[in-house]
Amino acid sequence: MEHTALGFNRAKDKMAQDLKMIVSDGEDLLKAAANVSGEGFAAARAKFSEQVTNVKAKLADASQPVIDGARRADDLVQGNPWTAIGVAAAVGMLIGFLAAKR
């Protein structure tokens, strides 16, 4: 689980960098739109579109391990509901016990 969280954090950081790059490219696109020929605008728009597509794909790839983990947890709870209830009750009692000690 920790490995998945670490991988997700790395992917999140990479996506944040990609989103900053998209914003920068968008600003460049807006500047170019003010005084550029049709050819230059088309090239800038194509670059921006490619960046958006890449970020969407990276977001889907980064979120897949989290979705798979949630699906496995859901399957576990669906298959063993009483075990899940028992574990949740035990954890709740432990937290209550520790909170009462303070």
Image (spheres, helix red, strand yellow):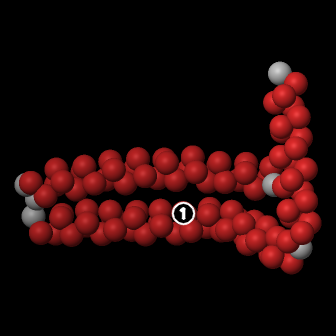
> Which element is circle 1 on?
helix
Across and down, in percent, residue 55 comes to 47, 62
User: Would you identify the image quadrant in which residue 96 lies?
Assistant: top right
- Of residue 67 and residue 28, the one placed in the foreground of this image is 67
> From where the camera sits, is residue 84 visible?
yes
- Of residue 11 and residue 63, the one placed in the foreground of this image is 63
Side (left or right) of 54 relative to 95: left
Quadrant of image for the C terminus: top right
Side (left or right) of 75 relative to 21: right
Residue at point 43%, 52% (across, down): 19
Q: Amino acid at mark 1?
A: Leu
Location of residue 75 with respect to 26 vertically, above or below: below
Residue at point 22%, 56% (across, down): 29
Across and down, in percent, residue 35 comes to 7, 55
> From where the camera sits, is residue 72 visible?
no
User: Would you identify the image quadrant in which residue 72 lies?
Assistant: bottom right
Across and down, in percent, residue 74 comes to 76, 71
- Of residue 67 and residue 77, the one placed in the foreground of this image is 77
The residue pinned by badge 1 equals: 59
User: Would you identify the image quadrant in which residue 58 lies?
Assistant: bottom right
Side (left or right) of 32 relative to 14: left
- Of residue 33 and residue 8, the one placed in the foreground of this image is 8
Q: Residue furthest top?
A: 102
Location of residue 73 with respect to 2 vertically, above or below: below
- All told, the count of numbered labels is 1
Residue at point 86%, 64% (across, down): 84
